[in-house]
Amino acid sequence: MSIRARIDALFPRLASEQQFPTQGQTIFVDLERQEVRRAWIPHRVVTQLLGGRGVNMFLLHNLLDEALEPIHPEVPLIFGTGILTSMVPSASRGNVTSWSPESRVLMDSNAGDYFPSFMKLNGIDHLVLYGKAPKWTLLHFEGDQPKFVDAAPFMGLDNIDLRAKIANDFSGVEGKDYGLAAITTAGENLVLCSGIMAGPKAIYARGGPGAKMGALNLKAVLIQGRSADLSTARPHKLRNRDVAVKLLNTSVVKNALKKRGTPFLYKPSRMLGAMGTKNNQETTWTDKLDAENIDPYRPGMEGCFACPVNCRPLNDMSVLGESGVGSRESETPAVDHVAATPDTRQPTPIPDKYVKGDGPEYVTLGKFGPNVGITEVTQVLRLNNICNDLGLDTASTGSAISWAMELYQRGMITREQTQIDLEWGNYETIERLLFMTAKREGFGDVIADSSQAVATGKYPRESLDYLMAVKGLTQSDPHDARILKAFALGLAVATRGMDHLRNRVTLEINAKINDSPDFKAELYGGPVSAEPNSYEGKETAVRRCENIYAVGDSVGMCRFTTKLFNSPSLPGYEEFADQVANVTGIELTNEAIDHIGLNVMGVERLINAKLGITRADDTLPKRWFEEAIGVGPYKGEKIDRGEFDKMLSRFYAISNLTEEGVPKPEWREELEGVLTA
Amino acid sequence: MLQTESRVTVRLPEPLREGRGDVITMNATSLGDIIAELDLADDRDELFNFAVNGDLVLHGEKDVALKYGDEVEIVVAFAGG
Ligand code: SF4
């Protein structure tokens, strides 16, 4: 059935008018025919899946034709904004959903900055994009009215220049006047590790959204104005004040997130002996990359739309003149990009536009530090700035490079094939490779295939033994989870692949919580072993985290500020339920809202099942079962296959899933009722 | 004599320094002594973890025994990013 026929079939089941105050439309845009249809998500779907990620799943489940290929333009690309996005502090987020061309399972990626908020501010809750535009297009919404603009003047531009040109051509300031989601040359070239940039750094990163958007011939979506009537069902600002106070009084926000951002995690991971190093062959690395060593290069912090936390560190290497681009004159970069000097391990001394930027996050620090053998802060900062400009997902790109480096180390690929020296820590190669990847040039074409490089015939089959991926998606963060069994289970069962942001029980590293069994049991809804490397009860903690994070994504709350991710004291169900009631008038109990989290996972598992995913895919990279950690307090630790399998079965049992990992028949029927009634 | 035998150095993160500098020495035979001395007990929201001689401690914190010359570091163990 074609996408148009699927939409025709879906339409009678959608609502023809707004269902609650502040609800935005779901807009279906046929890029090929330049046609637009509008509807509203029915109340009964909202009460089961809320909005954002949850409702995106409803739409994908209805519109996905698994007989196609993920990159096919009739597989839709769906942007969604949370039900509270832009209206509650730190609810600045939204998701983009499709079938991933990178992993070939569910694609679902979250971003902040401004784009999701500008969707909501203009009355657009979901944007379903499909069909290949006859020529490269910029979709320009003035309010909720789209225009199909010829994107020719913007083609070939990467993030920095593209955003500057759009600000100039559309006379506005991003974040104040408009939100922009755009692809770079990497997306134009269908690079599988490319994302959709939602700001200078914010990126819908995981699963190849950049390639998916590129396949539609869609360069950018620009949403300009603040046209929606966002009058709430009941006053909500007073409660917003409580939420903001709660956020800002949480120790981790005060002491870490607001001051240095996520690079803080590098040090504890390193000290635990759990810092993924050289494609996880090793697990500890230099203290030179500890967050405090980035301090001298941090001129300030940035934040997403109306978020009081401002957790995103900026970087400016020109201040110390030792940036690798070392000049105070770099305020106005003399040149666009100067390649690293080939015969040293140092970047060029000539200033260019990568002397400053936004970031890094811990993920980038790990993936472009230890994982590829880099030890210098300035080199990591520069690679971070280049990835932001090229629109490359640092998790997937860093993982693809470290995979290649290990294959090179093992002689499974040779210099003859690569034409470049892939030795660990070779900064010059890594920098060059990023540009080659964005253009699919030389060996960059192999990196651009990310985890699919075996399927596309570029690596031998045995290479898969060294791919640090689950369900085709490489690990999102650098933490080696052989020690913390809850982390390991989360990575195995995450519906989008090996990703920590779906269900990580991050508080497993908090000794005070581990040493308070009653408090811990209350937090997760059941007993969970105090010992991080034990398998006991870890399924309970993962289940609770998966539910609350799915709810967070559906209301639009940032993961960093959602209860359980960074602290037990951050806003959670209580605040979400109160503000959903105040904003929309929809009353939900804490139990009901928790069940919504479960529903979102259930629908995601139904989608993955259609794509052929089974229990066998809820697993971990071979290395973690077979090779033990070699350093630190947990030396000798690895994943025991038998114990892991039992933990997985327990996880399925408490998740209302069959032994194959899909919703049990009764619940499945219930979910299908919501999805197809 | 006992006092000298239990002398350890403690490296403090910025939020806990309170004018004390970044490294202090104290008498402690277990991490529990340091927790009591710095008044860190029972605040589960504070994500401060201990590392003893470079190894991070994830549970059983109060009972971790210390000996003369041990180097303890308190790390802001920001959880996820
Ligand atoms: S906490 Fe940070 S990433 Fe999250 S919404 Fe706020 S500024 Fe954005």
Image: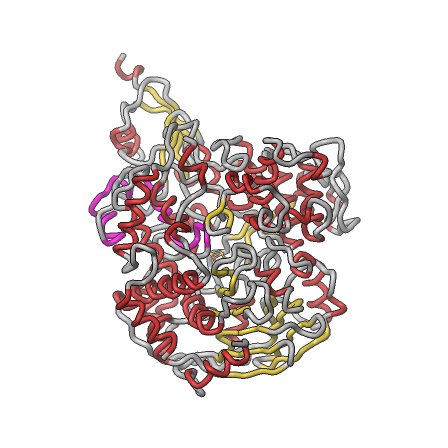
Q: Is residue A434 magenta?
A: no
Which quarter shows the C terminus of chain A?
bottom left
x 30%, y 71%: residue: A669
Q: Is residue A510 magenta?
A: yes
Q: x and y percent of residue A443 in the render?
A: 69, 44
Q: Is residue A584 left or right of residue A70?
A: left
A266 shown above or below A141: above
Q: x and y percent of residue A57 in the render?
A: 43, 68
- Given residues A611 and B78, the one toward you in this image is A611
Q: x and y percent of residue A469 in the render?
A: 49, 46
To which quarter of the image does residue B5 belong? top left
- Spot the residue most to the left: A518
- Spot the residue most to the top: B1
Q: Is residue A573 left or right of residue A270?
A: left
Q: Is residue A372 visible?
A: yes
x 48%, y 75%: residue: A125
Q: Which color scheme does this rendered protein use?
A: secondary structure
Looking at the rendering, the stretch of residues picked out in magenta corresponds to A497-525
Q: x and y percent of residue A470 in the render?
A: 46, 48
A535 shown above or below A53: above
Q: Is residue B61 left or right of residue A305?
A: left
x 35%, y 68%: residue: A239
